[in-house]
Image: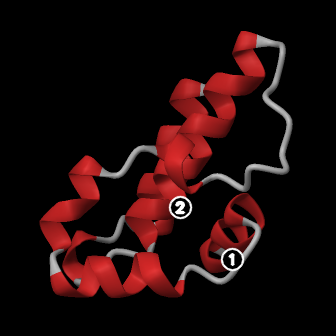
Amino acid sequence: MFMALVLFLMGKHPTELLTLLSLSPSSMQSILLKDILDPRLTSPQNQGVASEIILIGRMALKWIHFKLQFRPTMHEVCSELLVKV
């Protein structure tokens, strides 16, 4: 599910991103969502929508983390989405 979301947000397979994360898992902290979003997507005009896209993008990036122990559980994802949306 989250890989499909990453594919949608990036507009391509995240091969380079996955390679980068596998070589340097700590690089996840320095990745800016705006740098990996598909440039063909238009920026949302509504701040609430933009915040939701950022939240979902961050969640998706956490879930594709190279090390399984750093990936959130579905319970954690649901809890975070319920609190912030």
How many marks overall? 2
Report the colour scheme.
secondary structure
In the image, what residue type sits under mark 1? Met
The vertical placement of 41 against 4, above or below, is above
Residue 5 locus on image (x, y percent): 70, 67
CA distance for labels 1 and 2: 9 Å
Q: Is residue 79 visible?
A: no
Residue 11 locus on image (x, y percent): 76, 68
Earlier in the chain: of badge 1 and badge 2, it is 1
Give whichever of 55, 76 is nearer the camera: 55
8 vs 60, left or right, is right
The N terminus is located in which quarter? bottom right
Residue 42 locus on image (x, y percent): 86, 35
Which residue is the site of mark 1? 1
The C terminus is located in which quarter? top right
Q: Is residue 13 visible?
A: yes
22 vs 72, left or right, is left
Q: Which mark is residue 74?
A: none
In the image, what residue type sits under mark 2? Ala
Q: Secondary structure at mark 2?
A: helix
Q: Residues within 10 Å of mark 1 (few under 14, many from 20)?
A: few
Which residue is the site of mark 2? 60
| Furthest residue toward front | 39
Q: Secondary structure at mark 1?
A: loop
23 vs 62, left or right, is left
The vertical placement of 24 against 56, above or below, is below
Give whichever of 16, 5 is nearer the camera: 16
Q: Residue at x 84, y 45 (%)?
A: 41
14 vs 72, left or right, is right
Give whichever of 4, 44 is nearer the camera: 44
Q: Residue at x 25, y 86 (%)?
A: 22
Quarter residue 63 falls in: bottom left
